[in-house]
Amino acid sequence: MALVSAFTNKQVIDSLCTALLPNIENMIVKAVDSAMVDAHDKLHEQEEQIHKLEQQVESLQAYSRADSVVVHGLKEAVAEAVSSNAHQ
């Protein structure tokens, strides 16, 4: 009963809050900092992945453009033969 009455005393509650508040604030700051570092690391990894994928897209586009060259003035049969030989 004495413990229960102590926790209902305003002075005891104020003293506990004063003593515990800096520790609670410190724990919250550490948790937020850790979450921010994790989020920053993940963002950096995703930016690197995006850069790699952009390079792959550029390579595929360059290959596609080179593979789809149309030479005007050639007969269609000759163009198809040249195209089929290029794919082999």
Image: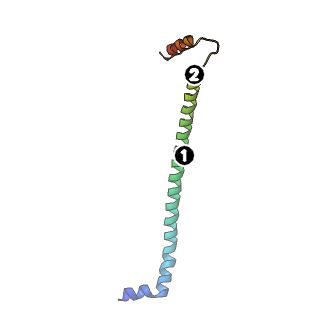
> Looking at this view, is 8 or 55 the one in front?
55
- Look at label 1 and name its amino acid: His
- At which x and y percent is residue 54? 56, 36
Position of residue 58 measured from the top left corner of the image (x, y, whole percent): 58, 31
Residue 34's spot in the image, x, y percent? 50, 57
The residue tagged 1 is 44
Marked residue nearer the N-terminal end (1 or 2): 1
* Residue at image point 64% right, 12% down: 73
Please identify the quadrant where the N terminus is shown.
bottom left
* Disc number placed over residue 1 in the picture, else none: none
Which one is nearer the viewer's eye here, 57 or 65? 65
Q: Eyeballing the image, is 76 above or below 63?
A: above
Label 2, on which residue? 68
Q: Quadrant of residue 44?
A: top right
Residue sitting at the far left: 1
Q: Secondary structure at mark 1?
A: helix
For this rendering, which residue is in front, 41 or 25? 41
Dot 2: few (<14), some (14–19), or many (≥20) neighbours within 10 Å? few
- Is label 1 or label 2 in front? 2
The residue at the far front in this view is 76
Report the colour scheme. Answer: rainbow
